Amino acid sequence: MSISARRVVRASAVYDLVVTVAFALPWTAAAAFGGLGALHHRLGLDGVTPSPDDVYQVLFAGLMGSVVTVWAVYRILRPSLAAGAADTLARGLFSLGMLVALTNGASPLVTTLLVPEVGWGVVQGIAVARARAVTVRASVAS
């Protein structure tokens, strides 16, 4: 795996860690929901935000946040083509979920997560594809 692809996989993992660690535990997820709701209302936005008082929303945010946090730490410590490819696919799925949420009335604040998610997916997808192509060419030449 090229140094540049390794750096991209690791950098995308650092981004994920910074963004999702606040959702990794029930009390931090509830606090994050409260903060997002306050910002949403302060900006006078349309749409809905998750409720810090809804036990199921907090539960699923905590599950997602803890899994993504662990996955991010793994990619920071062991970046690889396979991890980068899997993460690129996951970014596509997360982006699709965010688009569905936006079309169904979620707060426009979701776009602040969607745009970097798509951006990292494209950058990482290109880096992984290029590194994979180099690996395939090298194995064919051998």
Image (cartoon, rainbow, N blue to C red):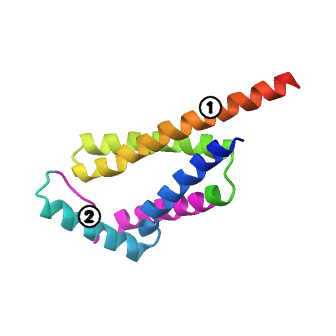
Measure the alpha-carbon separation of dots 2 and 1.
Answer: 36 Å
Q: Which residue is mark 2?
A: 36
Who's the residue at 13% across and 64% down the image?
Answer: 42
Q: Amino acid at mark 1?
A: Ala
Magenta extent: 47-73
Q: Amino acid at mark 2?
A: Leu
- For residue 121, side relative to residue 141 (left or right): left
Depth check: 93 or 124 in front? 124
Please say if 135 is above or below 90.
above
Q: Which of the labelled discs sits on residue 129, or is there none? A: 1
Which marked residue is nearer to the observer: mark 2 or mark 1? 1
Who's the residue at 42% across and 46% down the image?
Answer: 117
Depth check: 129 or 32 in front? 129
Who's the residue at 66% across and 51% down the image?
Answer: 79
Magenta segment main secondary structure: helix
Circle 1 packing at 10 Å, graded few (<14), some (14-19), many (20+), is: some
Residue 77 lies in the magenta stretch: no
Please state the horizontal and vertical placement of residue 136, each as a whole percent of the image. 76, 27
In primary-sequence order, the first of circles 2 and 1 is 2
Q: Which of the labelled discs sits on residue 30, or is there none? A: none
Depth check: 115 or 41 in front? 115
Quadrant housing residue 104: top left
Instruction: Give the SS element for disc 1.
Output: helix
Please state the horizontal and vertical placement of residue 121, each as a whole percent of the image. 49, 40
Please say if 35 is above or below 45.
below
Image quarter of the N terminus: top right
Quadrant housing residue 50: bottom left
